[in-house]
Image (cartoon, rainbow, N blue to C red):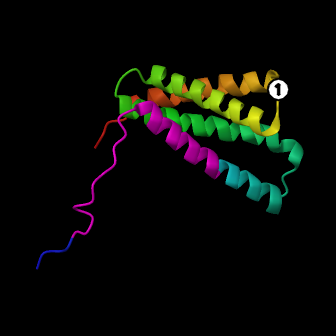
Amino acid sequence: MKPINAMKNVPKVHMASPMLAGILYASIWLALGALLLSTMLRFGSMQETQLPLYSLIVHGFASLAGGFVSGKRSGMRGWYYGGLLGFAYGLLILLVSFLSMNTGISGRTFTMLIETVICGALGGMVGVNMKRS
């Protein structure tokens, strides 16, 4: 008797745009990082004064993951797609923070934008060099 493979006929979803896929994955990593930070803030010994540093780390990881996915999906010019994704991600975060908390532009916002571009480009370079199995 043959084993029944229930997942055999399930259609797979494929996003044509590497940028859209990268933004989606970066948003997922941002949500997980925000959940981790809020848990550490509530139940751990983390102080609120440490939150800006840790949020920069979370934004860096989210941009790295998004750049990785974007570079892997594009198959070429990973630094370009990853850096562009990091720039778009950084602008999206700045827009959301401006609209939700009425924050202005400061040195910290430029630091975050530069960090997301660099991490996204690095993730894109690694992602484009990963071979699909």
Residue 17 in magenta stretch: yes
Q: Residue at the front extreme?
A: 99
Where on the picture, by quarter, is residue 14? top left
- Image quarter in which the N terminus is found: bottom left
The residue lying at 80 percent from left, 63 percent from top is 43
Q: Residue at the bottom extreme?
A: 1
With respect to residue 48, does 1 lie above or below?
below
Instruction: Give how far across and how far down residue 83 sits, in percent.
Output: 53, 23
Label 1 sits on residue: 104
Instruction: Give how far across and how far down residue 86 sits, in percent.
Output: 57, 28
Q: Which residue is at the front of the view, 126 or 117?
A: 117
Amino acid, disc 1 = Gly
**Tag 1, which secondary structure?**
loop
Instruction: Give how far across and how far down residue 44 sits, in percent.
Output: 81, 59
With respect to residue 48, does 70 lie above or below?
above
Where on the picture, by quarter, is residue 88? top right
The residue lying at 73 percent from left, 40 percent from top is 55
The residue lying at 88 percent from left, 50 percent from top is 47
How packed mark 1 is, by other alpha carbons closer than 10 Å (few <14, some 14-19, many 20 or more), is: few
Query: Which region shows up in magenta?
Result: 5-32
Q: Does residue 129 appear in the picture of this structure? A: no
Instruction: Give how far across and how far down residue 70 sits, in percent.
Output: 44, 32
Residue 20 in magenta stretch: yes
Q: Which residue is at the front of the view, 17 or 126?
A: 17
Q: Which residue is at the front of the view, 8 or 1?
A: 8
Judge from the rendering whether residue 84 lies leftward or rightward of residue 9; answer left or right: right
Judge from the rendering whether residue 102 lies leftward or rightward of residue 126; answer left or right: right
Q: Does residue 25 appear in the picture of this structure? A: yes
